[in-house]
Image: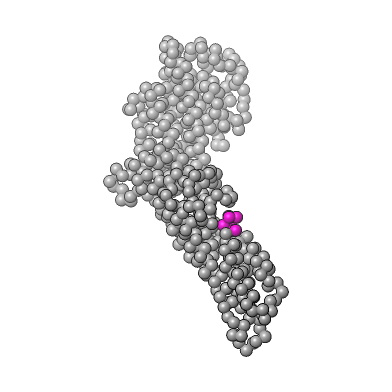
Amino acid sequence: MQARHETTVVHFGADGCHGSSSSSGGSSPYSLSGPSLDSDDGSTSTDEYCPDDPLEFRRHVSIFSPSVLAEVDPSSFRPISQSLSCVLADVDKHLQRMVLLLPAFSASAASAARTDALRKWLAGFNVGWVLDMDDNGSLPRREVGRRVSEWAHALGTMDRVFRHRHREVRSPVNEAAVAELAALGRLAGESAGAMLRLAGSVLALGSSPSKLLAALDVHAPVSETYPGLARTFSWPPSHPVSVASDAALAGLLDASRRCVCDLSAFIRAPQYPWRMPQGGEVHPCVGFWMGYFRGMLRNRVSLYFVLAGAHLDEERTTPLPPDEGSLVMELISCLEAVLEDKSGALAFPGLSQIFMLNNTSALVRRAVRSDLSMFMPPGWVLAREERMDGYLKSYLEVSWAPVVARLAGKPGALTVLRRRNPLSPFYSAFENVCSMQRGWKVPSPVLRSVLRTTVLESVLPAYRRYVDDHPEVEIPAGRSVEELENQLSELFEG
């Protein structure tokens, strides 16, 4: 589409990943089959338009077919809590509200009454706020994500209500039915027109990751709902709602293309909070961007049109990938490159490798355990596991190879301080590395176990050989092989 930055961004920080059949190469120690990822507005209440008196109720609906009166139970209209009215989505309830509001959309109704009824109708879906938006959009960026979700739910429910009532009223054809169908069409047209104001608000946003998700989230329901409404109510292409919806769809697609072109720049943006975790753990940007990529795929059809149409735009200088899969893989590669570049800011020997191990592992897990896995080319996971092998070898070389090298000297090859234990340089280097790395964090239990095992196998055999080969060297208290192993087993807890 989520974390957590802007509302939309925040939404994508949580993963909710599911299983995948993607191959991981099988033989790597970083097998991905281990533990799962660490991984009021002031709208007017409708109650005042729902009279308790049956006589008052009948006065509101008297212009329609007698069958309407038989279908609606006035006693069902009782004051309902604001919290319930905000989430009311039951079609039958909205149909009953519609009966009360339709008289305001008859041919003889006053304009003020129609305006008031439209506001009450939209407020019943918790989207009365669309009438308070101007043509250029008036929603703060941080409100867009929440509003789009409410809006899409309301539009879908409205569509079902309109189609349901239209089917009920159109037969048999009589004077009352014709009058109700006309009023229903006016209500549908004015509702649909008002709902399109949100598209203008999205288009008014500056280019950003959140704008792309909002544009896709609005494009999908508009492209699905408005053609159906036009068919139901026989609106021609020149109908104001049809014209407005076509313009909104074109604007949303163009805005989406511009945002897609900017995504790589957004990922690299220096103003992004690229403060590096000093324990080498997973950077928040991994969860954010991987969740964001999944958010884009919520509306794959809309994204398909965004990418397909870009190749017909001769004025666009920035090329776009040909399909969703290529786009996702390109953006993930961009994220990996940024992580690699930023890791250079970690000055302690071995910390940049731990950082890349953590982040590559998290990135792969989030990909293979989500719907992103369907876009992975053959060998994608295996290539990253091999990359992780390289990080691990480099980590050993810069962190522990210098420690083990202290065991290469001979007991007699010391300075004149012959009483000094020849293992003192080894112990000193060992303690320095353990002290520093004890604060580093590897969140994944699988990766943490692999790291510890690798360090143990690199350091302890060399130390044991030295002790066995030099029985004359006194081993201080607390320096047995088992005690050094216990120290190494405490690493990477953070």
Query: Toward which corner of the image does residue 277 lie, by quadrant?
Result: bottom right
| Residue 445 is covered by the magenta coloring | yes
- Residue drawn at point x = 60 percent, y = 62 percent: 452
Image position of 188 with respect to 7: above or below: above
Provide residue 464's location: percent of width, then percent of height: 63, 72
User: Residue 471 versus residue 376: which sits nearer the camera?
Assistant: 471
Name the quadrant containing residue 198.
top left
Query: Against 305, is 288 above or below?
Result: below
Residue toward you, 306 or 192: 306
Say if 227 sits above or below 307 in the image: above
Q: Is residue 290 magenta?
A: no
| Rendered location of residue 363, percent (x, y) | 50, 53
In the picture, measured across the screen, residue 472 lies left or right of residue 234, that is right
For the magenta stretch, what is the residue range? 442-449
Task: Report whether 143 appears left or right of 331.
Answer: right
Quarter holding the C terminus is bottom right
- Provide residue 469's location: percent of width, then percent of height: 62, 77
**Residue located 51% across and 55% down the image:** 27
Main secondary-structure element of the magenta-colored stretch:
helix
Q: Is residue 219 visible?
A: yes
Residue at point 37% right, 22% down?
A: 234
- Can I make out residue 9 in this image? no
Viewer-proximal residue, 458 or 40? 458
Residue occupying image coordinates x 53% and y 44%: 19
Which quadrant holds residue 249?
A: top left
Q: How many tags in the picture?
A: 0
Q: Residue furthest left?
A: 314
Q: In the current view of this chain or complex, which residue is farthest to the bottom? A: 416
Residue 328: x and y in percent read: 42, 48
Looking at the picture, tell me which residue is in the foreground, 336 or 184.
336
Q: How is the image coloured?
A: one colour
